[in-house]
Amino acid sequence: MRFDLRLIKRTGWLTGSILLLGILLVLGSYLYGWSLNPMHRIGDPIDSLNHVPIFHNGSTTHSSGRSTSSDGYNLGQKYQCVEFVKRYYYQRVNHKMPDAYGNAKDFFNPRLIDGSLNPHRGLLQFVNGSRSKPKSDDLLIYDSSFFNRYGHVAIVASVSKREVEIVQQNPGPFSSSRKRLAVRYEGGSWYYEDKRILGWLRKN
């Protein structure tokens, strides 16, 4: 019995130490710009889509200040997901959003009907369950979650019959910038299997 108690105490101490270290690393990333992934420094280019680079952010909560284009257009907080998709649309399709601010989930307006113009973003908006099939260069919008109240945005890189590949910035310090998502065609509409996906935006 004595051995078991000692083992429990040691295990508890070890667990507490690991938890404390994790908290310190997250705080260090948030306050001082530490990268939680030792393989990359914050701001390292890790991928690209159509020659638009994707940068490492260290941790999902980190920000390195505001990014703007050469003509002063607000692209968002450096290395966050929003900054990449706005920079991509600015460089790839020469698009500026009329409303240049807002969190990722705010890109989607739930009051709009499928296929109508989202005036704040200057893009057509489609719901998850749209009659319009997903296309390359669509801007994909995720709702908030328990661990992420801001939502998430990504760009569709390619589309096949049952699958879509997305490219994203700031998915997490150890997560891939690329991800494959299942899609299905049912009852004349297209659905992403991931229920957090609200819909997608597209330049007309």
Image: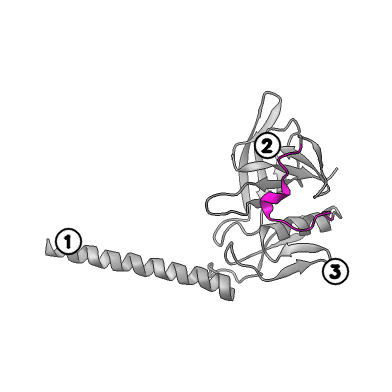
Q: Residue at x 72, y 33 (%)?
A: 130
Q: Quadrant of the C terminus?
A: top right
Lower position in the chain sequence, tag 3 or tag 2: 3
Disc 2 crowd, CA 10 A, few/some/many (<14, 14-19, 20+) = many
Q: Residue furthest front?
A: 111
Spot occupied by residue 198 in the image (x, y as percentages of width and height)? 66, 41
Q: How is the image coloured?
A: one colour
Query: Helix or strand or loop: what does disc 2 sit on?
Result: loop
Lower position in the chain sequence, tag 1 or tag 2: 1
Magenta segment, which residues? Answer: 96-112
Residue 174, numbered circle: none
- Give me the C-alpha separation between circle 3 and circle 2: 34 Å
Query: Helix or strand or loop: what does disc 3 sit on?
Result: loop
- Give me the C-alpha separation between circle 1 and circle 2: 53 Å
104 lies above or below 57: above
Occupied quadrant, residue 197:
top right
Residue 128, numbered circle: 2
Residue carrying label 1: 4
| Residue closer to the observer: 37 or 6 | 6
Is-magenta flag for residue 103? yes
The kind of residue on which mark 2 rests is: Asn
Q: Residue furthest top?
A: 187
The kind of residue on which mark 3 rests is: Ser
Disc 1 crowd, CA 10 A, few/some/many (<14, 14-19, 20+) = few
| Residue closer to the observer: 106 or 60 | 106
46 lies above or below 154: below
Q: Residue at x 68, y 47 (%)?
A: 141
On the picture, is 122 further left or further right than 105? right
Residue carrying label 3: 70
